[in-house]
Image: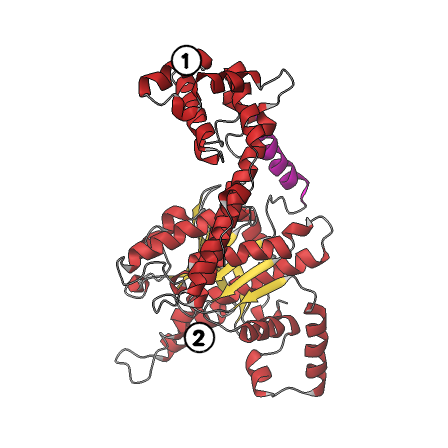
Amino acid sequence: MEKIEAAALPHNIEAEQALLGALLANNKAFESISDYLKPNHFADAVHAKIYEVISKLILREHAADVIMLKRYFEQQGTLNDVGGYQYLIKLAESASPLTNPEFYAQYIYEQYLRRELIATGYEIINHAMKEDIETTVNDQIEEAEKRLYDLSDKGDAGRGFIDFTQALTYSLGTIEKAYQNEGKISGISTGLDDLDKSTGGLNDSDLIVLAGRPAMGKTALATNIAYNVAELMSRSQNIDANKRGVAFFSLEMSADQLATRILSSTAGISSQRMHNGNIDNGEYDRIAEVARSLEKMPLYIDDTPGLTINAIRNRARRLKRTKGLGLIVIDYIQLITGSSKRGEANRVQELSEISRGLKIMAKELEVPVIALSQLNRGVEQREDKRPVMSDLRESGSIEQDADIVLFVYRENYYIEHEKPKETDKNYTPEKLEKWEQKMRATKYLAQVIIGKHRHGPTSTVDLSWNGEFAQFGNFIRDERLPEQIG
């Protein structure tokens, strides 16, 4: 494939001349464009050199005019290389009082991005033409997506400092939203009232780490929240279209397993019975009815194993662009593949890179990210099994990068394994009865321990738990048996 000649690439020499002339006539105009326009953005090498010298003179608080430019280039012995003194005069005369430096600067920058897009396209083609045993096709696609997104991110030329008045407006908007919301929360509701009250809901740009030991119900809680949010989005008219969507990256369970869990929880039928076909006609009809009601749910599941953090970011960006996105759930951090190859970085460093990438993604896409995480085995080795922040320390910078850290804890799981046996030396019927009482009292109880909260205090939230349906719900504080709580 023949490459396009440089002269045919997008550029506009007259626009570059007009901008340089405007800067020579009014050095103050440099302030409004210097944040994003750089010398390499000019198509003409001579103009790039002249803009570079203008930048240096202004930044050193010298006047940048024809006389100073002539003197500078003469000292460097490069005056002829930039067209000589007459060309500098021509540039100065090319500006008029109507010349808009910001317009021309933005136009020149856009032409530069077009040239970069063409160059990136050729590099992607050339890379795809080569066979590399260490690079898979998926790796190439992922890298291409990343490069294209990085290029689009460059296009945000106006991004920079935000005036404090504007920041205050954003802040007041968030406060007003919380004030007007019936649940008094500023973010998206998880569907769990007490958890919402303690965290303020799921707020944009927050990284929420949901951690726990195996069998505590991390995936079940994340699935419940994802379903609750998607259900809210499907029926609420107050949510922007570009915020209607939940992305669930399931790196451990398949999409159909996750769907079965949601069906089980919503229909109130054990997933084991559904899997074995041990259901009657009425239950089958109820499952079919629930399935139809869930079809339009804006919940999108990606069960590709071993995704890298860059692949997750690329896919989330694409989903936001095409269908909308308001929440990302990742199950779980330790199953994300590190970007390092050939083992040059250890796993702790990889996890640090991954957690930073998750926080950057949350801020970049302006959506909350719930990332599940395993805890180290230290929990099992102590008498008090309730998780604490130190149980995350072996996971790199997860604790540091997270805005909120939630620990899922079910005391009943540990009590179940402490059942007194008649063969025990100190066994008594009273001990067995006491154990049974503790089992009954905790069977339907779960807790979410808020170990870190960047926006408020830490606390512990009680939730109801139904293991048959892997379902968390609002905890009702009364004297009824848990079985009676719907």
For discs 1 and 2, the disc positioned in front in the rendered view = 1
Residue at the disc numbered 2: 436
Residue type at mark 2 is Glu
- Left or right: 317 in relation to 132: right
Residue 397 on image: x %, y % = 34, 50
Residue 417 on image: x %, y % = 37, 75
Foreground: 216 or 251? 251
Foreground: 383 or 302? 302
Identify which residue is drawn at 62% across, 70% down: 484
Q: Is residue 304 above or below residue 206?
A: below
Residue at the disc numbered 1: 68
Residue 34 on image: x %, y % = 48, 27
> Is any part of residue 225 visible from this angle?
no
Foreground: 160 or 407? 160
Is the C terminus in the top left, top right, bottom left or bottom right quadrant?
bottom right
Q: Is residue 207 above or below residue 441?
A: above
Residue range highlighted in magenta: 165-181
